[in-house]
Amino acid sequence: MRAPYGNGPLAPAVLAVRGAALLLALVALAHTLVHGLAEPGLALVFGLLVAAGELVRRDAAAGEREPAPLAAAGALAYALLGDSAGRPTTHGALQVIALVVAAQALAAVPRRACGRRTDADRAARRTLTVGFAAVCFQPLYASGQAERWFGDGPWFPLFPLTVLALTALCDAVLAALLARSAARAERPGALPPYGSLLVDEVRALAGIGTAIGATGVVTALGVAVAGPWAPAVLCGPLLLTQVSARRYTAVRTTCGQTMASLARATEIAGYTPPGHARRVAALATAVGRELGLTGPRLTVLEHAALMHDIGQLSLLDPVAGGATARLPAAEQRRIALLGGAVVRRTGAGPEVAAVVEQQADPYREQLLAARIVRTVNAYDDLCGESVGGPLRALEQLRLGTGHDHQPQVVEALGRVLARGGLAPAGAG
């Protein structure tokens, strides 16, 4: 697997995140070494929990938000830990950070020995996120301010829940920052809007993020009542959630691979130019982000862009350049409907099929995803016809905004291409 940032220099944002995490880790480790380990038995329990969570994780699959939920929940629980079996703890924020860093380093040794890669960005992000939670919780708990605000009764859990919500937002900010840097490395100059990436990360918190956060808070509250034995019982359900999430991710990955293979069938059979589906999918996804699509809507757009030409396999003879716009309207409609029928059999979902089926409809009757695929497909076709380069192709699309293409989609395409240096779609 290729490194996230290739062999070139790291982006400034990545350097800033890693540098901040390294500085925080060094300060926390030095403080813990000088002042000693508070509650060593409790620290050992949580350290082993975080290390075990890192050991049982596998390399992150495409689209997987958190490959080590057990480690994340254990780290959050230690950061939000106040009492243990009714007695106040004194470990503090810096010991929390030191323990998480040490546990991650301990788990990295056997992983590297087995040839499994480590993700420096995820480790840095977890260090900063857990550090944020610990700094928000531990000083207020130790000073008694949290108890004065929330009391020591049934309202006290609102305090760790509030810290958890702020921590989730902090993690989303860091994740979006790193995702934008990774996108820059994949396609220099064509940066997705940071706002769209942030919205995508925040929405993703409703999935595995909710399970991790809830387990962390419940584990911390359980230790406050039952002592160090609580994590062994309370973290069990998260393991089941991890297994289910991995199975779901595997199904999604298989579905994506199936559609990518089917998309290549039109190229192998000579119906579309080599790389056409891949180029349209990549550029359509960038335009979708530019227009504010995130999460599942962006996935539907990508899959539909890959499969938009699959109906051409019903033609006896390929259309020159794969441009079906030259065919009669009835034939275009038949190809689109057949493509949608094929998509429905792949398990991609009715949303993807609907986008493919609408490719021959007037753009005012199409879904936004269908309008994006239509415009990007036309751009790639025009570039393949050597109409005068990408600027000329974009100009022709603008001339057709009154009846063939939505003006907002064409302008979004122009902005994406401008950031990418207006490289021809067929390049690469």
Image (spheres, helix red, strand yellow):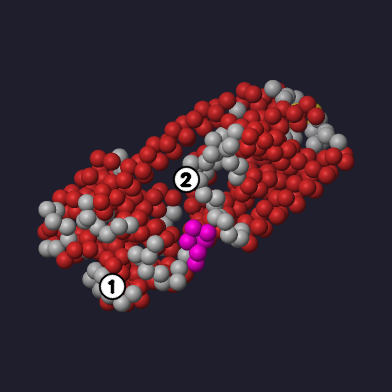
Q: Nearer the viewer, residue 72 or 206?
A: 72
Residue 63: which numbered mark, if any?
A: 2
- Residue type marked 1: Ser
Which quadrant: the C terminus? bottom left
- Name the residue located 61 percent from the left edge and 49 percent from the top edge: 121
Quadrant for residue 396, please give it: bottom left
Q: Horizontal placement of 94 versus 413: left or right?
A: right
Q: Where on the picture, by quarter, is residue 275?
A: bottom left
Q: Residue 259, which numbered label?
A: none
Tell me which residue sits at (47%, 61%) in the image. Answer: 187
**167 and 318: which is toward the camera:** 318
* Residue situated in front as seen by the camera: 146 or 106: 106
Kindly indicate whether the residue at mark 1 contacts the one at mark 2 (C-beta within 8 angstroms).
no
Mark 1 residue crowding within 10 angstroms, few (<14) / some (14–19) / many (20+) = few
Q: Which residues are magenta?
A: 184-189
Q: What residue is shown at x 12% (from left), y 63% (from top)?
A: 328
Which disc, if any, is residue 386? 1
For residue 11, what is the image quadrant? bottom right
Q: Position of residue 42 (x, y in %)?
A: 76, 28
